[in-house]
């Protein structure tokens, strides 16, 4: 079957309306190089790495025996998470205010707004028990992915029940939910996850972390509880489910005032989640945590030992495999036993799906009553009405972000970027360029975890097929164990052993060359040779699993892998097999980002032509509604450099941008590009290569083809 496809392909090649290039809807099978499907390559590759990392973690945990051993481990976890999320800000006035009250028979609801950061409001409901004199134990309720936030039915029932049982209950809206909704993000998916997705990406690029914002809201909520005369600040608990279970888990390394914790439907073991094919949200991703031997899904709970902890899980949770719950629980039990407090840890697993149903809530009440004061037998919830969402509103408009002077999460990201943008000097001489390149290369390799040097890949060269005017050779390159890069090596008729080479890269893989018929033929006619290759996770090896974030957690970013792939392709092209006079890169879309970074750390590229390239990482942060997400994330990149600095490092090599895009994928205006690339232009001019840098905007059709061909005319 495969041979018949190749015969069909070769029959079509002689006339240059090459259908192999020219038909937009040509079957992908005709570009297939691999003998077997490789759509699980990235899954197997990352899973193998993560399995090794967790084997090391388990070996390390197995050595912990004493109280001191576990305490040292807890401190490592605290320090590590703080280093990943970034330093927490200084505490500022809460400026808390009560905007309304609801009187009920045995409890009172106060509508609260406080500022976790200056002008950054948090909306909350405070439930005060009646008939319980003196200072009371308090519970902070944090909420998962519920758009209604504090008004969600099961959240209200939990809060009301806590008040009925004598607790002061504070329930806060998380970022993107309740009265902190941001409607503009609805097009990205359901709220609040869509807000987390967009702001999380922008925070990553800027060098901060969405979790930093979210955990600070919760810490300041504890601060607010401690200001209330009704609260015994020595008896504070926290609970939440799903994303609320995440916050209940992740706050513990930072908040020693929490005495009792009940995370529901979240604590787990990442190794089980990886084998179940599960992804996560931006706020739960800590770069290289597995490399450090830390599982962020559950390890923060070790910092709570020996205080009372209940993991409230369910048997049919499709986001948290029960096996992962029990694996985590086994290690936690050992830690509690080493502290002489095994009775303070318990795992409950109710027969239910991912939820916080009545039975789960009642398990929580019993645990809270046992350890914060009260009668654990008073766990039944009872039946009672809940409030309408509009009746719980703290702000007249129902949205605290609409109040005058209020900041949104995007404002926090932009402010952070403004305060932490790195300084880069002008590049006006060869010495400036050398210094600039060294600094930039060091940053690229550090951020993308690229090992130095890049070695030549293994190569499997398949039997060539001749066609009128040239030769097609399937090639499979292997830059590292577990990764293959299928490619097509095209040579013109009567090709010499030397000559220029074009490395073609596209987000869709080598098949995208099918849509560039006349351009590909023109290059072959000019005696260029073309290597069209699928970078890892594209083309035949798609999907790349960027949306899983396993690569970040494992410290093996796919972006870094693709830069390494390009460097490996360059090494192969520089070998005697290709024997090039010069190597050019022709890249489109996000692949162009990785081509630019690869060219900065490899001097083997003579020039690049880049179609539809994101004009700068900052443009994806500054725009309110970006069109990019995890596919462009280089964590912390803007604390080190942006694309203009990379282009400066490429001088005096030839670079042409064709139709650069803003962060929302709108065409970049000439005025914006002139501002963004002003120093790039200055650098090229200072090095006497002003003509080697060019930017073309608003070109399409034949004009665009002409721009691309003119790049290769020399």
Image (tube, grey):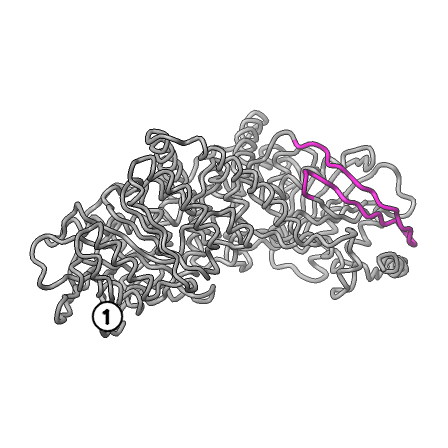
Q: What element carries label 1?
A: loop
Residue 458 is covered by the magenta coloring: yes
Image quadrant in which the N terminus is located: bottom right
Is residue 453 visible to the viewer in this orientation of the structure?
yes
User: What is the x, y in percent for residue 213?
Assistant: 34, 49
User: What is the x, y in percent for residue 532?
Assistant: 75, 49
Query: Along the line of sight, which residue is nearer the eye, 486 or 333?
Result: 333
Residue 536 lies, with reference to residue 74, above or below; the image says below
The residue shown at (31%, 40%) is 305
User: What is the x, y in percent for residue 680?
Assistant: 55, 40
Query: Along the line of sight, which residue is nearer the eye, 189 or 264?
Result: 264
In the visual, does 321 lie left or right of 539? left
In the visual, does 141 lie left or right of 559? left
Secondary structure mostly seen in the magenta stretch: strand
Which residue is situated farthest in the left direction here? 133
Q: Residues within 10 Å of mark 1 (few under 14, many from 20)?
A: few
Residue 385 lies, with reference to residue 271, above or below; the image says below
In the visual, does 493 lie left or right of 199? right
Q: What stretch is highlighted in magenta?
A: 454-483
Task: State the residue position of label 1.
Answer: 382
Residue 558 is covered by the magenta coloring: no
User: What is the x, y in percent for residue 381?
Assistant: 25, 67
């Amino acid at each position: 079957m495969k041979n018949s496809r190749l015969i069909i392909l070769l029959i079509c090649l002689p006339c240059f309306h090459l259908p192999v290039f020219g038909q937009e809807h040509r079957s992908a099978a005709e570009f297939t190089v691999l003998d077997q499907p490789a759509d699980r390559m990235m899954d197997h590759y990352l899973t193998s790495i993560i399995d090794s990392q967790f084997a090391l973690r388990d070996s390390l945990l197995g050595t912990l025996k004493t109280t001191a051993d576990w305490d040292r481990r807890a401190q490592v976890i605290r320090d590590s998470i703080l280093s990943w999320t970034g330093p927490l800000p200084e505490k500022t006035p809460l400026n808390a205010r009560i905007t309304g009250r609801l009187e009920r028979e045995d409890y009172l609801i106060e509508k609260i707004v406080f500022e976790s950061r200056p002008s950054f409001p948090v909306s909350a409901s405070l439930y005060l028990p009646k008939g319980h004199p003196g200072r009371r134990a308090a519970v902070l309720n944090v909420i998962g992915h519920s758009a209604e936030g504090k008004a969600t039915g099961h959240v209200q029932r939990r809060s009301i029940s806590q008040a009925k049982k004598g607790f002061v209950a504070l329930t806060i809206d998380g970022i993107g939910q309740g009265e902190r909704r941001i409607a503009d993000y609805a097009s990205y998916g359901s709220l609040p996850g869509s807000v987390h997705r967009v702001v999380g990406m922008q925070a990553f690029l800027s060098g901060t972390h969405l979790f930093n914002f979210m955990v600070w809201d919760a810490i300041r909520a504890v601060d607010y509880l401690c200001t209330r005369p009704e609260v015994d600040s020595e008896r504070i608990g926290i609970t939440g489910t799903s994303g609320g279970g995440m916050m209940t888990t992740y706050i513990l390394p930072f908040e020693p005032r929490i005495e009792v914790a009940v995370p529901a439907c979240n604590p787990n073991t990442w190794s089980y989640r990886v084998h179940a094919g599960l992804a996560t949200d931006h706020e739960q991703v800590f770069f290289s945590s597995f490399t450090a031997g830390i599982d962020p899904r559950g390890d923060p709970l070790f910092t709570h030992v020996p205080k009372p902890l209940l993991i409230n899980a369910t048997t049919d949770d499709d986001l948290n495999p029960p096996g992962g719950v029990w694996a985590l629980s086994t290690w936690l039990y050992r830690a509690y036993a080493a502290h002489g407090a095994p009775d303070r840890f318990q795992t409950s697993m109710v027969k239910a799906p991912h939820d916080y149903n009545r039975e789960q809530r009642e398990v929580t009440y019993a645990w809270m009553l046992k350890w914060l004061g009260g009668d654990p037998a008073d766990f039944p919830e009872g039946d009672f009405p809940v409030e309408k969402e509009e009746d719980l509103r703290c702000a007249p408009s129902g949205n605290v972000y609409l109040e005058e002077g209020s900041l949104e999460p995007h404002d926090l990201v932009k402010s952070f970027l403004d305060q932490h943008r790195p300084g880069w000097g002008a590049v006006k001489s060869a010495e400036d360029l050398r210094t600039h390149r060294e600094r930039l290369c060091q940053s690229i390799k550090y951020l993308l975890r690229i090992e130095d040097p890049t070695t030549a890949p293994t190569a499997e060269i398949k039997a060539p097929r001749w066609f009128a005017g040239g030769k097609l050779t399937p090639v499979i390159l292997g830059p590292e164990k577990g990764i293959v890069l299928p490619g097509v090596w095209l040579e013109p008729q009567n090709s010499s052993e030397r000559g220029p080479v074009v490395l073609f890269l596209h987000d869709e893989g080598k098949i995208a060359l099918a849509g560039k018929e006349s351009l590909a033929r023109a290059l072959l006619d000019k005696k260029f040779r073309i290597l069209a290759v699928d970078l890892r996770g594209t083309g035949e090896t798609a999907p790349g699993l960027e949306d899983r974030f396993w690569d970040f957690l494992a410290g093996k970013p796919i972006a870094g892998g693709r830069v390494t792939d390009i460097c490996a392709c360059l090494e192969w092209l520089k070998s005697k097999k290709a024997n090039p006079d010069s190597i050019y890169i022709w890249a489109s879309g996000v692949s162009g980002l990785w081509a630019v970074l690869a060219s900065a750390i490899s001097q083997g590229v003579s020039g690049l032509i880049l179609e539809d390239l994101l004009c700068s990482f900052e443009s994806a942060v500054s725009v309110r509604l970006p069109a990019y997400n995890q596919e462009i994330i280089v964590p912390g990149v803007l604390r080190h450099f942006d694309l203009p600095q990379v282009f400066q490092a490429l001088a005096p090599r030839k670079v042409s941008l064709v139709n650069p895009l803003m962060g929302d994928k709108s065409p970049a205006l000439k005025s914006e590009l002139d501002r963004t690339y002003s120093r790039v232009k200055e650098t090229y001019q200072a090095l006497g290569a002003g003509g080697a840098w060019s930017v073309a905007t608003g070109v399409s059709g034949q004009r665009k083809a002409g721009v691309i061909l003119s790049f290769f005319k020399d």
